Image: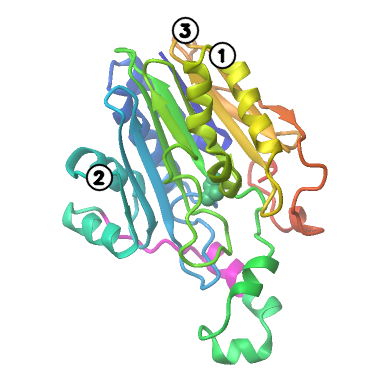
Amino acid sequence: MIVIANNEGKSGIPTAARLLAAGAPGLDALEAGIELVEDDEEVCTVGRGGWPNLLGEVELDASAMHGTSLRTGAVGGLKGFRHPIRVARQVLERLPHELLIGAGAERFAAEIGAERIELLTERSRGAWQRWFEAEVSEEDRRRWPEVALERYCHDAVDPEIGKDTTVFLAQDAERHLVSGTSTSGWGWKYPGRLGDSPIIGAGSYADSRYGACACTGAGEMTIRAGTSRAVVLYMKMGMSVGRAVEEAINDMRALQGGLLNRVTIHAIDNRGNHRVVAVNGMEGNHYWLWTPGMDAPQAFPAEIVEITPQVTRKKGAMSVYTRPDGMPG
Ligand code: GLY
């Protein structure tokens, strides 16, 4: 048994670990852990309190994958619901589909009785309002929202440049590997932008025969490199979990243009080994790990690998927001 969560998973991993230790199915443990992160308003990239898009609306993405059946469930651009991970899990459990987006995802969430909630908090609404007043031209403010958003999506300084997420990976007592993700995505994103969290193969992948992987950070990069599926496939081809992550990082080195920023790759194999590497990461990047024999989940530093000398980062952006735990975003 093992469970790993990224830095943002702090509020959920003790519950996930407790459930796994009690013999719960991996997806039940992950869903319970991720729901706690979705409720944690200190985490500004997941659930309620997550940063909104350019229009000031919070759009949530989430996914779940069972590595034995290879069934997945994901939602993208879901507005107004408290637990996107629960809706994603029910896509997996109930539908003949793997991914629902926008209005269809909201319709399904209502159909299954998912709880509605106001996702904006005083902090996230205030941060968006300050951006709107400082960065949007007077003429555009008059015509808002009937304006071209393209330039704002290029120029907007996300309050938390990390473009984070929460990701959980686990192997349960019956040796099933599972993965789960949940995010509000990139703050100040173009409306409708999906990151990698709901894209199985990019933001997460699990195959009980080999291993599982999930990524945080700039989803644009892992979508282009197919990172999570690649890591698991490299394990299938015989690489150790550590070598598989290195090879997926090599794939990222080929990316040219577009958004090049930070990505953290979290991976486990089916024998309880793991590796976590922060690509273009910063000191302080860490993850949470629990295995039987540990009293409680513990934080460990992620390895840092620099592949892009100059990531796409507006000068001064890091100083806009400091996470409550003092860690970089
Ligand atoms: N990795 C989260 C996102 O890109 O939205």
Could you say whether the residue bearing mark 3 is in a helix, strand or loop? loop
Q: Position of residue 280 (x, y in %)?
A: 73, 38
Amino acid type of the residue tagged 3 in the rendering: Gly
Q: On the image, numbered disc 2 is attached to which residue?
A: 91
Please state the total of marks drawn on the protein image.
3
Q: CA distance from mark 1 to mark 2?
A: 32 Å
Closer to us: 147 or 329: 147
Horizontal side, residue 138 vs residue 8: left or right: right
Task: Name the disc covering residue 239, or none.
Answer: 1
Query: Which tag is nearer the camera, tag 2 or tag 3?
Result: 2
Query: Which tag is nearer the camera, tag 1 or tag 2?
Result: 1
Q: Which residue shows up at 57% across the image and 45% down it?
A: 224
Q: On the image, numbered disc 3 is attached to which residue?
A: 293
- At label 1, counting other C-alpha atoms closer than 10 Å, the crowd grade (few under 14, some 14-19, many 20 or more) is some
Q: Which residues are magenta?
A: 115-130
Horizontal side, residue 198 vs residue 96: left or right: right
129 lies above or below 173: below
Q: Which residue shows up at 53% across the image and 21% down it?
A: 234
Where, quadrant-wise, is the N terminus in this rendering?
top left
**Mark 1 or mark 3, which has the lower sequence index?**
1
Could you say whether the residue bearing mark 1 is in a helix, strand or loop? loop
Amino acid type of the residue tagged 2 in the rendering: Val
Horizontal side, residue 139 vs residue 283: left or right: left
**Mark 1 or mark 2, which has the lower sequence index?**
2
Amino acid type of the residue tagged 1 in the rendering: Met
Could you say whether the residue bearing mark 2 is in a helix, strand or loop? helix
User: Is there CB contact under 8 Å for labels 2 and 3?
Assistant: no
Q: Position of residue 40 (x, y in %)?
A: 47, 46
- At label 3, counting other C-alpha atoms closer than 10 Å, the crowd grade (few under 14, some 14-19, many 20 or more) is few
Q: CA distance from mark 2 to mark 3?
A: 34 Å
Q: Position of residue 17 (x, y in %)?
A: 41, 22
